[in-house]
Amino acid sequence: MFGLDLAQLGFVALVVVAVAALAYVFFFESIASQKKTEERLNEVKLAATDSLGKFTVRDKQAEAIKRRKSVQDTLKDLEQRQKLRDKNIKSPPLKMLIQQAGMKVTMPRFYLYSALAGIVATVLGLLFGSPLYLAPGLFLAGALGLPRWFIYFRRRRRIKAFLNEFPNAIDVIVRAIRSGLPLNDGIRLIAQEAQEPVRGEFRRIVDNQQVGVSIPEAAMRMSEYMPCAEASFFGIVIQIQSQAGGNLSEALGNLSRVLRDRKKMAAKVQALSMEAKASAYIIGALPFIVAFLVYLTSPKYIMILFNTSSGNFLLACAGAWMSIGIMVMKKMINFKF
């Protein structure tokens, strides 16, 4: 009975193995095909992921190239505009000079004042014994030289006052932007609270904005009324940020730091050049001091230079040579930033 059971069990096992073998034979191709399909799907998914990553990288590169090109185009446009503004800064018309000096004088009144200055200079020259044939020269010097010298003097003093206050104004704008206020509110704050002439320049930006001019364009125009590199830097930073984007508060903070460093460097150079300036002042004043001392001790000896034609010629030559020397010394001891 036990041996029969073993024979039956062996037969059943052989049947099961045969059936399994037959099933494997019949379903092998289907299993292999399904496995290949799964592998293919995985390869397709991996390729799609790689392709998507490549497209993403390509899009980022294209966006970076586009942004770089936009910045380059903006810089070229700003460079062309800056060349035109530099031309106006180096040789501005008379009306622009009056505006840069902060003077509110109309052109007819300025010409009237120039004529009066020429008449006063001529009268004073004749009263002090100047020859009559020098009267036209005195009139031209008084009418053309003195008013323009006064304008340039006011212009330099106004630019110096602007540079002293401008970094503080930029710091206020940076704090306003970091606290959440827009740029135009920061500019309005400076236009109301800052000291002159910074307040007037920022008020001009606000006025231009009210008539439809954008803030970047109005900021670029600041250098026309305030002819200094610092005003141009401010306009360029605002213009680039408006077109290319970026952290405006960080850019303006860097600008403020650069302006303060330029001011420190200018003060350091001025301190180092004071010895040369003092020497130039002494050398320039020495002929006049010697002439005055000679006049006090021997007036007849030096009056030959003023009473004779040959003496006048020598004085003219000496004045020309001294003017050339003073101009050379001025170029040597003056440094522009």
Image (cartoon, rainbow, N blue to C red):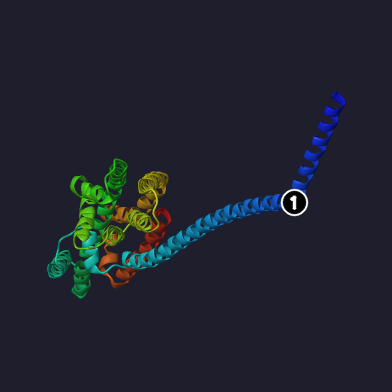
Residue 220 at x, y percent in the picture: 31, 60
**Image point 28% across, 50% down: which residue?**
183
Q: Amino acid at mark 1?
A: Phe
Q: Residue furthest right?
A: 3
Q: Nearer the viewer, residue 42 or 1?
A: 1
Q: Nearer the viewer, residue 119 or 261?
A: 261
Can see residue 76?
yes
Quarter of the figure with the N terminus: top right
What is the secondary structure assignment of the residue under circle 1? Answer: helix
Can see residue 146?
no
Q: Residue furthest front?
A: 1
**Image point 31% across, 46% down: which residue?**
170
The residue indicated by pointer 1 is: 26
Q: Is residue 234 above or below residue 16?
A: below
Q: Nearer the viewer, residue 81 or 267?
A: 81
Q: How many marks?
A: 1
Q: Residues within 10 Å of mark 1 (few under 14, many from 20)?
A: few
Residue 29 at x, y percent in the picture: 73, 53
Instruction: Answer with left or right where residue 327 lies relative to residue 222.
Output: right
Residue 47 at x, y percent in the picture: 61, 55
**Image point 74% across, 51% down: which residue?**
26
Instruction: Answer with left or right where residue 272 lies relative to residue 298.
Output: right
Q: Is residue 240 above or below residue 251?
A: below
Quarter of the figure with the C terminus: bottom left
Residue 20 at x, y percent in the picture: 76, 42
Q: Nearer the viewer, residue 307 or 273?
A: 273
Q: Is residue 56 above or below residue 84?
A: above
